[in-house]
Image (cartoon, helix red, strand yellow):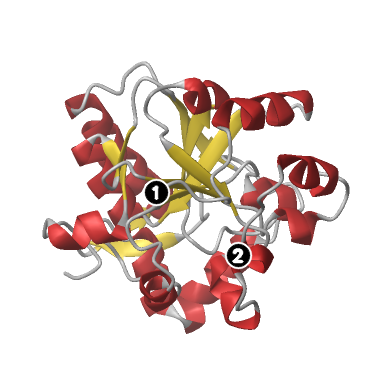
Amino acid sequence: MASEFDIDKNDLYEILSKKGINNLFHANTISTSITFLNEKNLLSRKYVEDNNLFQTPQYTDNKDKRYGIWDDIFLDAIDIHTEFRRPNNYGPFLFSFDLDILKSDLVKTIRITKVNPSKWDKYPLENDRYYSDLNQFDDNYRKGNKLKDVGSMFILKDINGKLPLLPYSNRFILDNPNLVVNYNNEKKVLADILTEKIDSILLANNFGDVTKELRHKHNFFNCTCWPKYNSFLLYNFSELKRLFHPTPNK
Protein backbone atom coordinates (compact mmCIF):
# COMPACT_ATOMS: atom_id res chain seq x y z
CA MET A 1 0.00 0.00 0.00
CA ALA A 2 1.34 3.39 -1.00
CA SER A 3 2.29 5.76 1.78
CA GLU A 4 2.33 9.55 1.90
CA PHE A 5 6.07 9.18 2.57
CA ASP A 6 6.77 7.33 -0.69
CA ILE A 7 8.75 9.75 -2.86
CA ASP A 8 8.60 10.06 -6.65
CA LYS A 9 12.01 8.75 -7.66
CA ASN A 10 12.12 10.69 -10.93
CA ASP A 11 11.42 13.98 -9.19
CA LEU A 12 14.09 13.11 -6.62
CA TYR A 13 16.54 12.43 -9.45
CA GLU A 14 15.92 15.89 -10.88
CA ILE A 15 16.42 17.57 -7.48
CA LEU A 16 19.67 15.75 -6.77
CA SER A 17 20.97 16.36 -10.28
CA LYS A 18 20.37 20.11 -9.95
CA LYS A 19 22.36 20.06 -6.71
CA GLY A 20 25.31 18.54 -8.58
CA ILE A 21 24.91 15.11 -6.98
CA ASN A 22 25.91 12.34 -9.37
CA ASN A 23 26.35 9.34 -7.07
CA LEU A 24 24.68 7.47 -4.24
CA PHE A 25 26.70 5.59 -1.61
CA HIS A 26 26.55 2.67 0.77
CA ALA A 27 29.30 1.98 3.33
CA ASN A 28 29.89 -1.25 5.21
CA THR A 29 32.51 -3.42 6.88
CA ILE A 30 34.93 -5.45 4.79
CA SER A 31 33.36 -8.82 5.61
CA THR A 32 29.79 -7.69 4.95
CA SER A 33 30.93 -6.01 1.73
CA ILE A 34 32.54 -9.27 0.63
CA THR A 35 29.17 -10.96 1.13
CA PHE A 36 27.59 -8.32 -1.10
CA LEU A 37 30.28 -8.72 -3.77
CA ASN A 38 29.93 -12.50 -3.80
CA GLU A 39 26.15 -12.21 -4.03
CA LYS A 40 26.46 -9.38 -6.60
CA ASN A 41 23.87 -7.35 -4.69
CA LEU A 42 23.55 -4.94 -1.83
CA LEU A 43 21.47 -6.93 0.64
CA SER A 44 19.20 -5.97 3.50
CA ARG A 45 20.18 -7.04 6.99
CA LYS A 46 17.11 -9.31 7.05
CA TYR A 47 17.98 -10.96 3.74
CA VAL A 48 21.49 -11.79 4.91
CA GLU A 49 20.20 -13.23 8.18
CA ASP A 50 17.39 -15.22 6.55
CA ASN A 51 19.77 -16.75 4.01
CA ASN A 52 22.49 -17.66 6.54
CA LEU A 53 25.04 -15.36 4.94
CA PHE A 54 27.66 -13.46 6.92
CA GLN A 55 27.41 -9.90 8.16
CA THR A 56 29.00 -8.05 11.04
CA PRO A 57 26.75 -6.54 13.71
CA GLN A 58 25.81 -2.88 13.34
CA TYR A 59 24.86 -0.64 16.25
CA THR A 60 21.54 0.14 14.55
CA ASP A 61 20.35 -3.47 14.12
CA ASN A 62 17.85 -3.59 16.99
CA LYS A 63 16.34 -0.25 16.04
CA ASP A 64 16.07 -1.22 12.38
CA LYS A 65 14.03 -4.25 13.41
CA ARG A 66 11.87 -2.21 15.76
CA TYR A 67 11.08 0.44 13.14
CA GLY A 68 10.29 -1.94 10.29
CA ILE A 69 13.29 -1.09 8.12
CA TRP A 70 15.26 -4.31 8.71
CA ASP A 71 14.49 -5.52 5.16
CA ASP A 72 15.26 -2.19 3.49
CA ILE A 73 18.45 -0.94 1.85
CA PHE A 74 20.01 2.41 2.73
CA LEU A 75 21.85 4.82 0.45
CA ASP A 76 23.39 8.25 1.04
CA ALA A 77 24.03 11.11 -1.35
CA ILE A 78 27.10 12.04 0.70
CA ASP A 79 30.46 10.29 0.99
CA ILE A 80 30.62 10.76 4.75
CA HIS A 81 34.35 10.00 4.96
CA THR A 82 35.21 12.77 2.51
CA GLU A 83 32.61 15.24 3.76
CA PHE A 84 33.53 15.01 7.45
CA ARG A 85 37.19 13.95 7.10
CA ARG A 86 36.66 10.94 9.35
CA PRO A 87 35.94 7.22 8.98
CA ASN A 88 32.40 6.22 8.13
CA ASN A 89 30.95 4.54 11.23
CA TYR A 90 29.30 1.86 9.11
CA GLY A 91 32.57 0.65 7.63
CA PRO A 92 35.65 1.31 5.47
CA PHE A 93 34.33 -0.09 2.17
CA LEU A 94 32.18 2.21 0.05
CA PHE A 95 29.91 1.23 -2.84
CA SER A 96 29.25 4.10 -5.25
CA PHE A 97 26.29 4.00 -7.65
CA ASP A 98 25.52 6.24 -10.58
CA LEU A 99 22.54 8.44 -9.79
CA ASP A 100 20.81 7.00 -12.87
CA ILE A 101 19.92 3.99 -10.74
CA LEU A 102 17.01 6.07 -9.44
CA LYS A 103 15.45 6.06 -12.90
CA SER A 104 15.82 2.30 -13.31
CA ASP A 105 13.35 -0.48 -12.58
CA LEU A 106 15.67 -1.63 -9.78
CA VAL A 107 14.28 1.09 -7.50
CA LYS A 108 10.62 0.59 -6.61
CA THR A 109 9.69 2.57 -3.51
CA ILE A 110 11.92 5.18 -1.91
CA ARG A 111 11.63 7.25 1.25
CA ILE A 112 13.87 10.01 2.62
CA THR A 113 14.60 10.32 6.31
CA LYS A 114 14.74 13.66 8.08
CA VAL A 115 16.98 12.24 10.80
CA ASN A 116 19.07 9.07 11.01
CA PRO A 117 16.87 6.16 12.16
CA SER A 118 19.33 5.56 15.01
CA LYS A 119 17.82 8.72 16.57
CA TRP A 120 14.16 7.92 15.97
CA ASP A 121 13.58 7.26 19.67
CA LYS A 122 13.36 11.03 20.01
CA TYR A 123 10.92 11.34 17.08
CA PRO A 124 7.83 9.16 17.66
CA LEU A 125 5.80 10.64 14.77
CA GLU A 126 6.46 9.48 11.21
CA ASN A 127 6.12 13.07 10.01
CA ASP A 128 9.24 13.85 12.02
CA ARG A 129 11.10 10.84 10.58
CA TYR A 130 10.33 11.05 6.87
CA TYR A 131 9.83 13.72 4.26
CA SER A 132 6.44 13.66 2.58
CA ASP A 133 7.10 16.80 0.53
CA LEU A 134 10.00 16.87 -1.94
CA ASN A 135 9.91 20.65 -2.02
CA GLN A 136 10.69 20.68 1.69
CA PHE A 137 13.55 18.26 1.13
CA ASP A 138 14.83 20.43 -1.73
CA ASP A 139 14.72 23.51 0.51
CA ASN A 140 16.63 21.79 3.33
CA TYR A 141 19.17 19.53 1.66
CA ARG A 142 22.74 20.62 0.90
CA LYS A 143 22.17 24.14 2.14
CA GLY A 144 25.21 24.27 4.41
CA ASN A 145 24.12 22.18 7.40
CA LYS A 146 26.24 19.05 6.97
CA LEU A 147 25.03 17.43 10.19
CA LYS A 148 21.44 17.77 9.06
CA ASP A 149 22.29 16.52 5.57
CA VAL A 150 23.80 13.31 6.87
CA GLY A 151 20.48 12.51 8.54
CA SER A 152 18.80 12.33 5.14
CA MET A 153 19.13 8.73 4.07
CA PHE A 154 17.41 7.18 1.06
CA ILE A 155 15.57 4.03 2.09
CA LEU A 156 14.75 1.57 -0.69
CA LYS A 157 11.71 -0.55 0.02
CA ASP A 158 9.80 -3.31 -1.81
CA ILE A 159 12.86 -4.82 -3.50
CA ASN A 160 12.90 -8.10 -1.56
CA GLY A 161 16.08 -7.11 0.22
CA LYS A 162 18.30 -7.05 -2.89
CA LEU A 163 19.77 -4.28 -5.03
CA PRO A 164 21.96 -5.51 -7.91
CA LEU A 165 25.43 -4.00 -8.00
CA LEU A 166 25.52 -4.00 -11.77
CA PRO A 167 25.12 -2.16 -14.03
CA TYR A 168 25.04 1.02 -11.89
CA SER A 169 28.08 0.55 -9.61
CA ASN A 170 30.77 2.98 -10.76
CA ARG A 171 33.37 2.76 -7.94
CA PHE A 172 34.42 0.52 -5.10
CA ILE A 173 36.38 2.55 -2.53
CA LEU A 174 38.53 0.98 0.18
CA ASP A 175 39.92 2.97 3.09
CA ASN A 176 43.67 2.68 3.49
CA PRO A 177 44.04 2.46 7.30
CA ASN A 178 47.84 2.91 7.08
CA LEU A 179 48.45 0.03 9.49
CA VAL A 180 50.86 -2.87 9.73
CA VAL A 181 49.35 -5.97 11.35
CA ASN A 182 50.29 -9.53 12.20
CA TYR A 183 48.88 -11.80 9.50
CA ASN A 184 49.75 -15.49 9.25
CA ASN A 185 52.67 -14.89 11.60
CA GLU A 186 54.06 -12.10 9.43
CA LYS A 187 54.04 -8.31 9.60
CA LYS A 188 52.03 -7.05 6.64
CA VAL A 189 50.45 -3.82 5.43
CA LEU A 190 46.74 -4.18 6.06
CA ALA A 191 45.75 -2.32 2.88
CA ASP A 192 47.85 -4.77 0.81
CA ILE A 193 46.13 -7.78 2.41
CA LEU A 194 42.69 -6.34 1.74
CA THR A 195 43.45 -5.17 -1.78
CA GLU A 196 44.68 -8.63 -2.78
CA LYS A 197 41.64 -10.29 -1.22
CA ILE A 198 39.10 -7.91 -2.72
CA ASP A 199 40.74 -7.88 -6.16
CA SER A 200 40.38 -11.65 -6.37
CA ILE A 201 36.70 -11.42 -5.43
CA LEU A 202 36.06 -8.66 -7.97
CA LEU A 203 37.72 -10.71 -10.69
CA ALA A 204 35.76 -13.85 -9.82
CA ASN A 205 32.46 -11.95 -9.91
CA ASN A 206 33.02 -10.01 -13.14
CA PHE A 207 33.40 -6.54 -11.65
CA GLY A 208 36.40 -5.73 -13.82
CA ASP A 209 34.76 -2.69 -15.39
CA VAL A 210 34.05 -0.99 -12.06
CA THR A 211 36.68 1.52 -10.96
CA LYS A 212 38.61 0.55 -7.81
CA GLU A 213 40.01 3.20 -5.49
CA LEU A 214 42.25 3.03 -2.42
CA ARG A 215 41.37 6.08 -0.36
CA HIS A 216 44.37 8.00 1.06
CA LYS A 217 46.82 5.78 -0.75
CA HIS A 218 49.83 7.87 0.23
CA ASN A 219 48.61 10.44 2.78
CA PHE A 220 45.46 11.39 4.63
CA PHE A 221 44.94 15.06 3.59
CA ASN A 222 43.98 16.41 7.04
CA CYS A 223 41.55 13.52 7.58
CA THR A 224 41.24 11.98 11.04
CA CYS A 225 40.91 8.41 9.79
CA TRP A 226 44.55 7.33 10.17
CA PRO A 227 44.80 8.40 13.84
CA LYS A 228 41.38 6.85 14.48
CA TYR A 229 42.30 3.52 12.94
CA ASN A 230 45.62 3.55 14.77
CA SER A 231 43.80 4.07 18.07
CA PHE A 232 41.70 0.99 17.30
CA LEU A 233 44.88 -1.00 16.70
CA LEU A 234 46.30 0.09 20.04
CA TYR A 235 43.22 0.24 22.28
CA ASN A 236 40.20 -1.35 20.59
CA PHE A 237 41.42 -4.22 18.44
CA SER A 238 38.01 -5.92 18.42
CA GLU A 239 36.55 -2.89 16.62
CA LEU A 240 39.43 -2.83 14.12
CA LYS A 241 38.80 -6.52 13.46
CA ARG A 242 35.05 -5.95 13.06
CA LEU A 243 35.68 -3.23 10.50
CA PHE A 244 38.54 -4.69 8.47
CA HIS A 245 38.89 -8.45 8.89
CA PRO A 246 37.56 -10.41 5.89
CA THR A 247 36.36 -13.13 8.28
CA PRO A 248 36.24 -11.51 11.76
CA ASN A 249 34.58 -14.52 13.38
CA LYS A 250 37.72 -16.59 12.82
Q: Which mark is residue 116?
A: 2
**Where does residue 4 sit, x and y in percent of width and height?**
57, 50
Q: Position of residue 219 (x, y in %)?
A: 66, 45
Horizontal side, residue 43 vs residue 210: left or right: left
- Tally of numbered tags: 2
Of the 4 image quadrants, the one containing the C terminus is: bottom left
The percent coordinates of residue 65 (x first, y second) are 36, 72
Callout 1: SS? loop
Q: Amino acid at mark 1?
A: Met
Q: Residue at x 85, y 55 (%)?
A: 145
From what the image shows, is residue 179 above or below residue 100? below
Residue positioned 52% across, 54% down in the render = 178
Can you name the residue that lies furthest to the front here? Answer: 1
**Where does the image place residue 208, in percent across and percent down from the top left?**
32, 19
Kindly indicate the quadrant of the structure image that contains residue 180.
bottom left
Q: Residue at x 35, y 63 (%)?
A: 70
225, 111: nearer the viewer: 111
Tell me if residue 99 comes above or below residue 190 in the rendering.
above
**Quarter where residue 164 is shown:** top left
Q: Which amino acid type is marked by label 2?
A: Asn
Frontmost residue, 192 versus 222 = 222
Name the residue at 15% across, 56% down: 53
For mark 1, does the 10 Å Cα neighbourhood hold few (<14), some (14 to 19), or many (20 or more) residues? few
Q: Is residue 160 visible?
A: yes
Q: Residues at badges 1 and 2 in contact (C-beta under 8 Å)?
A: no
Residue designated by label 1: 1
Horizontal side of 71 relative to 123 (left or right) equals: left
Between circles 1 and 2, the one closer to the viewer is 1
Q: Secondary structure at mark 2?
A: loop
First in sequence: mark 1 or mark 2?
1
Residue 244, placed above or below residue 35: below
